[in-house]
Image: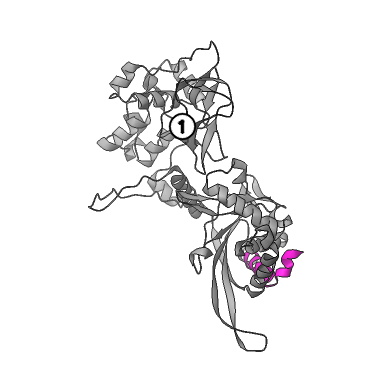
Amino acid sequence: MPEVIMPKMGDAMEEGTLLKWLKSEGEEVSPGDPIAEIETDKVTMELEAEDSGTLAQLIASEGQDVPVGEAIAFIAGEGEEVPERDGGASAEAAQEDGGDGGEAQAQTATETEAPEETSDEQADGRADGRADGQFRASPIVRRLARENNLDLSKIEGSGPAGRIVERDVRAAMESGTAQRTQEDGAAEQPDGQPEVQPQQASQQGFQAAHLPEPTGAPGTQLVEPTRMMRVIGERMTEAKQNIPHFYATVEVRIDAAMALRKQLNAQLEAEGLKLSVNDFVMKACAVALRNYPNLNALYTSKGVELHETVDMAMAVALDQGLITPVIRDIGSKGLAAISRESKDLAGRAREGGLKPDEYQGGTITVSNMGMFGVESFTAIINPPQAAIIAVSSIDRRPAYDENGEVVPAQFMKLTLSADHRIANGRDGALYMAEVKKTLENPVLLMV
């Protein structure tokens, strides 16, 4: 019987949220039918059926986080019966858990163990979910326990075969029990490595965040962060802490670029196309990378990977966070092609219609906040990329022409954030000087 699983929509994706079932249990489905709405750290999208049959069983409940590859439903063909799931999800179990049958059923189905833990427990013959210091708990539950300084050995599991599930950890958080102490020593991570203790963390340059409890004061509102907000926060915190950023800012006089833009837009008006300032900036940043390949690079586990092709990610703000769709091989494309593609990607990004390969794999990022009137800002590098360019607003002010006369002029600040492990200050300064020269002589964008 085919399983409907939580798909992997990105290299870094570990889990997704089932937002809403679009089909009910017992309904007939065909390949391509949308059956559920899921949320990843990047997009909200419809999950389509890949097989024909009856949606025989909904395993995951709405609002539940499900690890990648876990089953969320079964599609039964003619004559097929729904297989029994590990541990079952009987009505009795639902009653024992306070009547929340949906939660019990979903957690029973999705909180599966790693294969090595199963074999350990079977070999040891234990039924309490513990084997040689290991505990039956998903990576999500382990992470929740670590973040709240809880010792899993002090928590009784209520899941199948003594598995520790999320509700057990949250109950321990509310009761204040199972707190890890210094005497407990280093807790085991899922990979068997000892967890970094606070005193060790400070020596390694990382300081765990200590968040205050909500005040609950009159007039306050507690808002739960979306998955996208949580993941962005985690990744940007990690990037800021672990990547040695350095910055280089140039001020570009863009009168010539604006004049060329006006001329080109007049010619493109019949096609309904209007070039943006950001189109010029992205093209200039790509052209300038020809001589600075170490800024069009990825910092990988095996070394610095230099890229000949510039796949430029552009930051697009969404109500619930940020996404960076990618314009592939932007250096080989003209301004009109860049404009069409950027508008299409940005529009579909805001509608949640991007495919995974359209927002993954960028080699450098451009982030533009000029439309918000921001005069200058620095951006956080999007790992494993080596650099990101922050684009600010256009400033109109007096300047001198070649004859020493005061004339109106337009200026824009661009700020490079670069990874000092890959590039040094000289590289960044020379690269930004090249970007400045290209934008101030926009005919260079046409060759």
The image position of residue 434, as x and y in percent, is 68, 68
Q: Residue furthest right?
A: 447
User: In the rendered view of the protein, which quadrant contains the C terminus?
Assistant: bottom right
Query: Is residue 189 left or right of 421 when viewed as pictured?
Result: left
Residue 385 can be seen in this image: no
Query: Is residue 183 left or right of 82 when viewed as pictured?
Result: left
The residue at 68%/67% (across/down) is 266
Give 379 or 328, whichever is nearer the viewer.
328
* Majority secondary structure in the magenta region: helix
The image position of residue 156, as x and y in percent, is 32, 26
The image position of residue 290, as x and y in percent, is 72, 60
The image position of residue 241, as x and y in percent, is 48, 53
What residue sits right under mark 1 in the picture? Answer: 66
Give 216 or 38, whichever is nearer the viewer.
38
Please check the rendered image and state whether residue 389 is part of the magenta-colored stretch, yes or no.
no
Numbered range of the magenta stretch:
427-447
